[in-house]
Amino acid sequence: MKIATDRERCIGAGQCVLNAPDVFDQDDEGTVVVLDDHPSPVEEPAVRAAEHACPARVISLVS
Amino acid sequence: MTPNTITAGHDAGASATPAYPMKRGCPFDPPAELAQLRTEKPISRVRLWDGSSPWLVTRYEDVRSVLADPRVSADTDRPGYPATSAAILARRKNTRSFIGMDDPEHSTYRKMLISDFTVRRTGSLRPLVEKIVNELLDAMERGPRPVDLVEAFALPLPSMVICQMLGVPYADHDFFQSHSRALLDLSVDVQESMRANDELREYLTGLVAAKEAEPTDDVLGRLAQQRVLTGELSRDDAVSMALLLLVAGHETTANMLGLGTLTLLRHPEQAAEVRDGDPGVVNSAVEELLRLLTVVHSGRRRVAIEDIEIGGVTIHAGEGIIAAGEAANRDPAAFVLPDDLDIHRADNHHVAFGFGVHQCLGQPLARLELQIAYPALLRRFPGLRVDVPIEEIRFRDQMIVYGVQALPVSW
């Protein structure tokens, strides 16, 4: 599982941090930061939830 | 305007087109016609106050698609944009905030504020929110019973928090609360609404100017010093942002607190679990109340800028779209037993804060306040009860943000 994000289009809603706090963070400007772009499989449901919840649709899982 | 007015270019079958927003039957549920449309005609024309007939989108997946679609505009100045009321249409002339703009303009403004609303930054306000909650509960405990929960707790909490954050003196709360109410009241006429808007602008203009002269450590202070004085943002635009944040910052959360508490009190077993305060339960209870109550209850307004195919319907460029989050959040295709309160509901990806690039900027703050306030209130007053028969409670049908006008409680 690999995570791709589009920081340019991120709107800083913070849904990713709420859904998968061990995988995502926001920088000081609110933009998504991936803490671990090859997270362990146990994180997959949380990452999928973040992908679904992201209102700007800038998170995708590449397996 | 007569109800039968049909303006050029609109649906020829407008006489059969249902009016929107519709009237509620049960005060705790969206209008039954919405559920019927969602099943039978999930993308269909509705008729608005001005005779126009935009598309109403009612299914969860369609609402998300529309709101995330770059071919759909939130620009309130575009022809075909479905205005909520004559007053809002009139107010746009001097207050255009970034929720009514498209990217890249919208994101330029939004980015000036995001750093103050990140999950972590908002989380640092926890001690402040807890302190305000405790002080308000102390005052309630000392005061007479019954007491109006809206006036004693639900409104002052978010109002005090947003004042602290923005740097607006809470001492002026009577002024800005009554003016905010006028801006969100669909029964207020154009003139009165414009006056409320102008007076709020005048007040906030003075505040921003003072913060340009004298730096303060708050959102408006930072905007004044880092954006207005540098020429990046006009004072007028700063005032429009301040107005949006001030109004959105207290009315929405206040109504979630009032209506949410009433809802919990009608489900005593679930209320007891919230009172026990397990953080996981409290968090999912808050999401569930946000979904079930969807207090922003008259749709998210958009206009198509290209032809789009959605759910077998073609929406043409220039046609208005209303994404009915209040219907989407009750869609059985997305939520099991959608009309039930289930504080343990998993995967609750509701659209109560909207979806797409305009999704609520202040949502981490709203969550923080609700997650602290519900259990604290229920713990302080374990015997909390509504002091009037349900028939006597007045609901905010005429307001852009739904809720209860007042909630007399005792314990």
Image: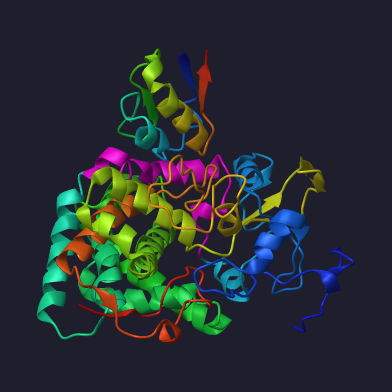
Q: Residue at x 48, y 72 (%)?
A: B184
Quadrant of residue B256 within the rendered picture: bottom left
Check the image and report above or below for B367 versus B260: above
Residue B76: quarter of image: bottom right
Q: Nearer the viewer, residue B363 or B233?
A: B363
Q: Residue at x 16, y 76 (%)?
A: B140
Location of the C terminus of chain B (image quadrant): bottom left
Which quadrant does the N terminus of chain B fall into? bottom right
Q: Would you say residue B116 sits in the magenta stretch?
A: yes
Which residue reaches farthest right? B12
Locate residue B9 relative to residue B343 in the image: left or right: right
Hey, which quadrant is residue B385 in on the image?
A: bottom left
Apparent side of residue B9 relative to residue B157 in the rendered image (left or right): right
In the rendered image, residue B362 lying in the magenta stretch gets the answer no
Q: Is residue B36 above or below residue B229?
A: below
Which residue is rendered at x = 58% and y = 64% of the image?
Answer: B298
Residue at x 32%, y 40% (from the top left corner): B118
Vertical placement of residue B369 versus B377, above or below: above
Dominant SS type (magenta):
helix
Q: Is residue B250 visible?
A: yes
- Disc tally is 0
Asked whether B45 or B235 is in front, the reply is B45
Task: Tell me where residue B196 appears, x and y as whole percent.
Answer: 44, 78
| Nearer-the-camera pick, B61 or B50 | B61
Coordinates of residue B6 in the picture (x, y in percent): 83, 73
Task: Residue B218 in the image: state x and y as whole percent.
Answer: 23, 52
Question: In this picture, which residue range is highlighted in magenta?
Answer: B95-123
- Reply above or below: B142 against B217: below
Can residue B320 be spotted in the picture?
no
